[in-house]
Image (spheres, rainbow, N blue to C red):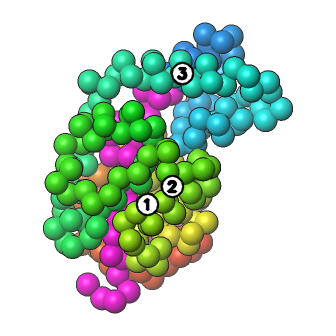
């Protein structure tokens, strides 16, 4: 690796490595429905990747009465927990983490999932042998698109923002990385389109972890950093 190559890879987990985006969508839809909020699933899906506070602001408006927010979050968490034992990794997820580690890259799960969910996600991935550091929502004061969880991931792993790449599946991931000038590789397996991810500033876009793994040698994860998140992205067909 050249001196300009990233020395670590930060991975979002929900929707990027574990197939949970639509489970979160349905769980939020039902939690909101129980509180008599009728929100289309399409809007909820496009909000997944934000923290619950910003998601509720986005869906219900920042001027709403926030007294019920705790109950909404609890309802979502309870509904989502019903899926824990059935969570599945996305294609090639564990293999991608191990391939990055084998190349000498530090692998960081920069997740903003709640601490009680992180164990279920790690169990679904079954790749702890390749993981250097894991964050949780407790490590960030603000949720994405604020970059707090990425700052925490860098601090806990000892990595420099100039030597890492972030892999995520939502425009909120791309926005958070851009605030730290970290290149973000987008994956469409969370249900966000190639055009949306590229338009948000992703430096490259792949279908899923397996597609990124297949192109790993020539991907931004292991090649010298030549672009910033504000440059035009490359896309994988």
Percent coordinates x, y for residue 62 in the rendering: 79, 35
Q: Residue at x 36, y 39 (%)?
A: 118
What secondary structure prevails in the magenta region? loop
Q: Is residue 113 left or right of residue 28?
A: left
Q: Which mark is residue 153?
A: 1
**Along the polypeptide, which appears first: circle 2 or circle 3?**
3
Q: Which mark is residue 50?
A: none
Identify the magenta region: 1-25
Q: Which residue is mark 3?
A: 74
**Along the polypeptide, which appears first: circle 3 or circle 1?**
3
Q: Which residue is mark 2?
A: 149
Q: Secondary structure at mark 2?
A: helix
Quarter of the figure with the N terminus: bottom left
Q: Is 8 in front, or is 37?
A: 8
Q: Is residue 5 above or below residue 110?
A: below
Percent coordinates x, y for residue 176 in the rendering: 57, 58
Can residue 83 be seen in the rendering of this structure?
yes
Q: Is residue 60 above or below residue 2?
A: above
Percent coordinates x, y for residue 203 in the rendering: 48, 67
Mark 3 in CB contact with mark 1 (< 8 angstroms): no
Judge whether residue 19 is colored magenta: yes
Q: Residue at x 34, y 22 (%)?
A: 83
């Amino acid at each position: 690796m050249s001196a300009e190559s990233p020395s670590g890879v930060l991975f979002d987990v929900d929707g990027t490595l574990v197939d949970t985006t639509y489970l979160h969508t349905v769980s939020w839809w039902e939690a909101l429905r129980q509180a008599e909020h009728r929100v289309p699933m399409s809007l909820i899906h496009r909000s997944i990747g934000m923290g619950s506070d910003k998601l509720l602001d986005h869906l219900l408006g920042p001027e709403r009465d926030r007294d019920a927010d705790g109950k909404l979050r609890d309802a979502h968490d309870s509904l989502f927990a019903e899926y824990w034992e059935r969570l599945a990794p996305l294609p090639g997820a564990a293999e991608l983490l191990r391939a990055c580690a084998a190349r000498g890259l530090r692998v960081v799960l920069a997740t903003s999932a709640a601490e009680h969910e992180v164990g279920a996600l790690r169990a679904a991935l079954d790749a702890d042998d390749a993981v250097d550091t894991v964050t949780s929502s407790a490590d960030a004061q603000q949720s994405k698109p604020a970059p707090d969880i990425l700052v925490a991931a860098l601090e806990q792993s000892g990595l420099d923002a100039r030597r890492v790449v972030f892999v995520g599946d939502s425009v909120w991931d791309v926005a958070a990385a851009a605030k730290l000038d970290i290149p973000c590789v987008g994956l469409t397996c969370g249900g966000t389109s190639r055009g949306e991810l590229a338009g948000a500033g992703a430096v490259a876009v792949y279908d899923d972890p397996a597609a990124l793994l297949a192109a790993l040698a020539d991907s931004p994860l292991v090649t010298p950093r030549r672009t910033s998140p504000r440059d035009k992205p490359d896309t994988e067909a």
